[in-house]
C-alpha cells in the first residue's frame, strides 16, 4: 500500500475581501471557516497549469497537520499489513464474480417471451453493467484490484475501456490525478464536470441522467480525439469492441432483433444512472470549496471537502464502498480497495473526531432535499471560497 501523505499548505488570499463566518454544515463539529463573498476573479481566471505549479511549490513549515496525516497513514498501513488477501482484494473480486454470473442468467431471461422475464433480464444486465463500469472501473483506475502493475493495466483496459467505453488514460488523468489531487479546489478538482447550469432542477436531477448511456459514448470518443495517435487508436479499438460485443451477444445469444438489442443496451445502462449522478454531486458539491492560494493540507482538505453517504445494499455492491459509505476514507487513502476502506472506516472516523476535524455524513434523502431546495445556489452559481481559520 502506498501512503498518501502529500500535503500542501494554504497561502493567504491576495487582496482584501469581505468574509462571512459560518459553520461547515453537517459536520457535527464546530470547525470555523471564512467564506469569501468578495471578488472571485482571481480564482476564476487561475490557469490550471500555473495553479498546479503554484501548489507543487507551496511547502508548509508547520508540521502539525503533516504529522497527523503520517500518524493516521501508519495506523491504516498497520491494518493493511495484518489483513489477508481475501480482505484486501478477494471480497471485491467475489462481488465482481457474482455480477459476472448475472450475465448468462440475464441472457437466458431475455430469450423468453414473458415480459416479466425480459424485464428481469434487463435488470440483471443493468446491475452487472454498473458493477463492471462503476465499481470495477473505479477500482481499476486506482489500481486497487491487485498488486501487479501488469494486471492492473489489463483490468483498467477491460473495465474502463471495454465495459465503460471511456479511454483508461482519460479516466485516470481526470479522476485520479485531477479530482483526487485537487479535491474541491476551484478550477481543478471542484466537481464542476457534473454541473449543467442551463438545465432546470427537476430536469437535471431526474431526466438528464437517463441520457448518460449515450453521452458516455460521445464523451469517450471525444477523449480519443485528444489522445496521441497510437494510444488513441488502441483505446478506440477496445471501446468499439466492448459496444459490439454487448450488442452481438444480445442478438445471437438472447435472440433479440437489432432494435430490441439496442433498446436493451440502453435500458440496462440507464438502470442506475439517476443515483449515479446524485452520488457524484452529493459527496462534494455543497461542501467547502477552496482557491488554489488557500488550499489546506491533505487531512484538512479531505475531511472538509468529502462526504460519506450511509450504506445501501444495492449501491454498495454496484458502486462500491469507496464511492458510497467510505468516500472520505477513499480520498484519504485512494490505494485501498473498497473492502479495505470499509475495514479502516472506524479507525479513520475515530481519529478524525478525536482531533476535532469534521467528518461529514448525511443520508441520501437529506442530500436530495438539500439539492432540490438549493439547486440554483449549488449547481448554477459560482461557489463561495472557504478559508480555514481555526478548529475548536
Image: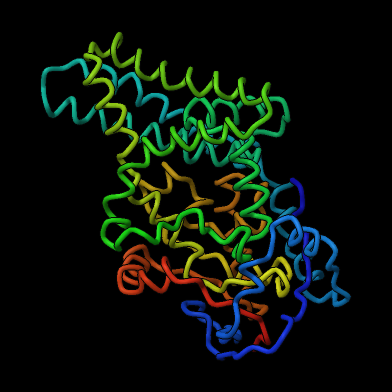
Vertical comparison of 280 with 13: above or below: above
Q: Nearer the viewer, residue 208 or 46?
A: 46
Instruction: Tell me if residue 133 can be seen.
Output: yes
Q: Position of residue 354 (x, y in %)?
A: 65, 78
Left or right: 299, with 192 as reference point: right
Direction left: furthest residue: 114
Question: What residue do we see at 38% from left, 66% from top?
Answer: 363
Residue furthest to the top: 252
Residue drawn at x 30%, y 68% as measured from the top left? 372
What is the x, y in percent for residue 55?
78, 64
At x 72%, y 85%, the residue is: 15
Residue 182 to residue 120: above or below:
below
Q: Is residue 31 visible?
A: no
Q: Quadrant of residue 229?
A: top right
Q: Does 289 sit left or right of 389 as displayed?
A: left
Q: How is the image coloured?
A: rainbow
In the rendered image, residue 265, in percent from the top left (x then y), is placed at: 31, 27
Judging depth in this view, the residue of 333 and 74 nearest the camera is 333
- Residue shown at 24% from the left, 27% from the top: 263
- Give the percent coordinates (x, y) of residue 295: 70, 71
Q: Nearer the viewer, residue 82 or 163?
A: 163
Quadrant location, the N terminus: top right
Q: Is residue 275 left or right of residue 263?
A: right
Viewport quadrant of the C terminus: bottom right
Amino acid at each position: 500500500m502506498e501512503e498518501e501523505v502529500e500535503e500542501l499548505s494554504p497561502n493567504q488570499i491576495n487582496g482584501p475581501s469581505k468574509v462571512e463566518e459560518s459553520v461547515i454544515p453537517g459536520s457535527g463539529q464546530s470547525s470555523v471557516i471564512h467564506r469569501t463573498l468578495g471578488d472571485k476573479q482571481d480564482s476564476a481566471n487561475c490557469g490550471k497549469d500555473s495553479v498546479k505549479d503554484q501548489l507543487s511549490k507551496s511547502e508548509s513549515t508547520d508540521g502539525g497537520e503533516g504529522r497527523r496525516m503520517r500518524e493516521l497513514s501508519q495506523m491504516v498501513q498497520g491494518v493493511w499489513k495484518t489483513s489477508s488477501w481475501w480482505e484486501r482484494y478477494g471480497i471485491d473480486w467475489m462481488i465482481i464474480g457474482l455480477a459476472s454470473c448475472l450475465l448468462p442468467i440475464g441472457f437466458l431471461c431475455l430469450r423468453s417471451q414473458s415480459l416479466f422475464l425480459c424485464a428481469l433480464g434487463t435488470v440483471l444486465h443493468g446491475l452487472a453493467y454498473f458493477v463492471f463500469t462503476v465499481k470495477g472501473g473505479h477500482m481499476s483506475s486506482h489500481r486497487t484490484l491487485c498488486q501487479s502493475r501488469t494486471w492492473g493495466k489489463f483490468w483498467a483496459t477491460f473495465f474502463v475501456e471495454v465495459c465503460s467505453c471511456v479511454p483508461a488514460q482519460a479516466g485516470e488523468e481526470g479522476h485520479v490525478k485531477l479530482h483526487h489531487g485537487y479535491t474541491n479546489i476551484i478550477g481543478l478538482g471542484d466537481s464542476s464536470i457534473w454541473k449543467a447550469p442551463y438545465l432546470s432542477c427537476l430536469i437535471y436531477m431526474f431526466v438528464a441522467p437517463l441520457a448518460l448511456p449515450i453521452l458516455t459514448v460521445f464523451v469517450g470518443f471525444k477523449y480519443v480525439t485528444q489522445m496521441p495517435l497510437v494510444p488513441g487508436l488502441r483505446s478506440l479499438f477496445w471501446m468499439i469492441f466492448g459496444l459490439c460485443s454487448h450488442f452481438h451477444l444480445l442478438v445471437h445469444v438472447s435472440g433479440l432483433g437489432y432494435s430490441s438489442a439496442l433498446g436493451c443496451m440502453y435500458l440496462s445502462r440507464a438502470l442506475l444512472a439517476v443515483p449515479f449522478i446524485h452520488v457524484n454531486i452529493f459527496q462534494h458539491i455543497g461542501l467547502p470549496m477552496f482557491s488554489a492560494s488557500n488550499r489546506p493540507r491533505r487531512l484538512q482538505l479531505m475531511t472538509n471537502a468529502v462526504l460519506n453517504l450511509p450504506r445501501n445494499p444495492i449501491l454498495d455492491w454496484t458502486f462500491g464502498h469507496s464511492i458510497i459509505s467510505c468516500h472520505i476514507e477513499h480520498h484519504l487513502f485512494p490505494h485501498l480497495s473498497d473492502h479495505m476502506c470499509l475495514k479502516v472506516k472506524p479507525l479513520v472516523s475515530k481519529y478524525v473526531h478525536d482531533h476535532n476535524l469534521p467528518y461529514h455524513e448525511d443520508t441520501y434523502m437529506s442530500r436530495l432535499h438539500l439539492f432540490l431546495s438549493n439547486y440554483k445556489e449549488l449547481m448554477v452559481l459560482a461557489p463561495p471560497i472557504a478559508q480555514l481559520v481555526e478548529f475548536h
